[in-house]
Image (cartoon, helix red, strand yellow):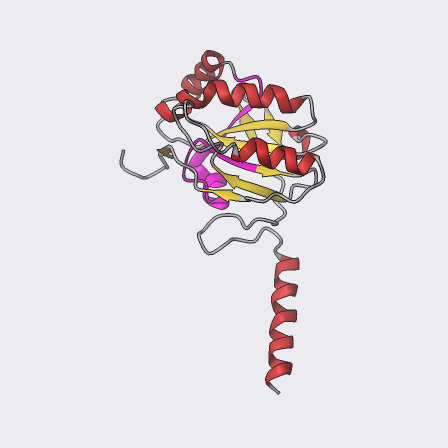
């Protein structure tokens, strides 16, 4: 009897996951292995851009950014270098700004100032950030060509860039492109808290 109950529970759990592949883990973020739903947001020019239109043939890196965060400023060159290197390998970059304290003009001028050569989308009301569980900037989500989440978290292990010993994101890219499993699928993201709608500064 107990065995039947266990089997039944397993089948139900599997069925629920199939119905809702964009699963949420216990920490409130997307589960590794979840299929991300397509979304559409306006870019800094006001044009609607969707994930499926922007994604690369070998995957997509979605990175939460901020115009005012000093940690993002410290990462901007690394972000641009990684984006350029892996764009040639079929991985597209998409920036997201969910900060209620940063208006469109600020985000647009920051994109130019920091030299981002990829679209930055505006997440009004931090709807996407809440759905995915993004909480800081920079924070990255690496999706494969079918929008399955392969890696989530930090870009590397040193915000200064002077003492990097773990290249989390590049290692995840390289493993996936080589057809190998990603050994470390999560690393705690660190940076500035996303300033969400309705929250005090």
Residue at 41% x, 26% y is 163
Q: Is residue 34 above or below residue 134?
A: below
**Residue 137 belongs to magenta span:** yes
Residue at 53% x, 19% y is 80
**Residue 24 belongs to magenta span:** no
On the rendered structure, is 142 left or right of 110? right
Residue 165 % position (x, y): 47, 31
Q: Is residue 127 above or below residue 117?
A: below
Residue at 51% x, 13% y is 115
On the rendered structure, is 131 left or right of 60? left
Q: Quadrant of residue 201?
A: top left
Residue 92 % position (x, y): 63, 27
Q: Is residue 5 above or below residue 150?
A: below
Regarding residue 69, the answer to whether it shows in the image is no
Which one is in front, 58 or 98?
Answer: 58
Which one is in front, 151 or 111?
Answer: 151
Residue 105 % position (x, y): 43, 17
Which one is in front, 199 or 68?
Answer: 68
Q: Quadrant of residue 54?
A: top right
Can you name the residue that lies furthest to the left here? 200
Residue 139 % position (x, y): 46, 35
- Segment tinted magenta in the rendering: 116-141
Q: Is residue 97 above or below residue 23?
A: above
Quarter of the image that includes the N terminus: bottom right
Q: Quadrant of residue 100?
A: top left
Regarding residue 25, the answer to whether it shows in the image is yes
């Amino acid at each position: 009897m107990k065995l039947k109950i266990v089997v039944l529970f397993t089948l139900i759990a599997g069925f629920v996951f199939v119905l809702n592949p964009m699963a949420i883990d216990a920490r409130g973020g997307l589960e590794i292995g979840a299929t991300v739903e397509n979304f559409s947001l306006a870019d800094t020019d006001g044009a609607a851009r969707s994930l499926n239109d922007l994604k690369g043939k070998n995957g997509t890196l979605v990175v939460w950014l901020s115009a005012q965060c000093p940690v993002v400023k410290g990462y901007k060159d690394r972000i641009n270098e990684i984006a350029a290197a892996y764009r040639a390998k079929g991985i597209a970059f998409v920036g997201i700004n969910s900060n209620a304290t940063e208006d469109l003009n600020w985000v647009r001028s920051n994109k130019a100032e920091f030299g981002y050569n990829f679209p930055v989308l505006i997440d009004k009301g931090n709807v996407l950030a809440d759905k995915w569980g993004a909480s800081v900037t920079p924070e990255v989500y690496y999706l494969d060509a079918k929008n399955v989440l392969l890696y989530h978290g930090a870009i590397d292990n040193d915000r200064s860039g002077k003492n990097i010993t773990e290249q989390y994101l590049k290692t995840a890219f390289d493993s996936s492109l080589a057809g190998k499993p990603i050994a470390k699928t999560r690393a705690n993201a660190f940076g500035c808290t996303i300033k969400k709608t309705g929250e005090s500064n």
